[in-house]
Amino acid sequence: MTTYRMKYRPASSFTLPRGLGWELVKAPTYLRVVRYDLPYDPALPFGEFKTDRPLTADEMRDYEIEVMP
């Protein structure tokens, strides 16, 4: 499973490619008080997410997304 993180903003249907299926793996800062079911990492202010398919290099560049190591 490949996971990703956003560089400059939280993941949402408005900040990810259209039609992409995605799910949070680690809570972003603004959700940590409501999403107790997700782990929180202060080093990831915008959280971590996984997608239903691998992202292309163009999508990662255009939407400012990084692969998690």
Image (cartoon, rainbow, N blue to C red):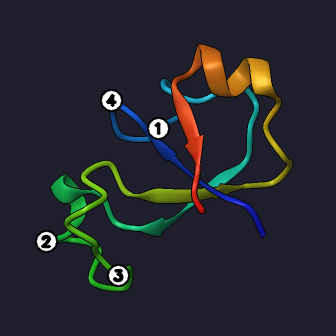
Q: Which residue is mark 2?
A: 33
Q: What's the residue at 78%, 26% (across, down)? A: 57
Pointers 2 and 3 in contact (C-beta within 8 Å): no
**Label disc, if present, on residue 12 of the rendered structure:** 1
Please indicate whether residue 69 sits to the left or right of residue 5 in the image. right
Q: Position of residue 15 (x, y in %)?
A: 49, 26
Mark 1 secondary-structure assignment: loop
The quarter of the picture where the N terminus appears is bottom right
Q: Position of residue 11 (x, y in %)?
A: 45, 41
Q: What's the residue at 29%, 74% (across, down)? A: 35
Pointers 4 and 3 in contact (C-beta within 8 Å): no
Mark 3 secondary-structure assignment: loop
Which circle, 4 or 1, is nearer the viewer? 4
The type of residue carrying mark 2 is: Val
Please indicate whether residue 42 sits to the left or right of residue 63 in the image. left
How far separated are the C-alphas under marks 2 and 3? Answer: 11 Å
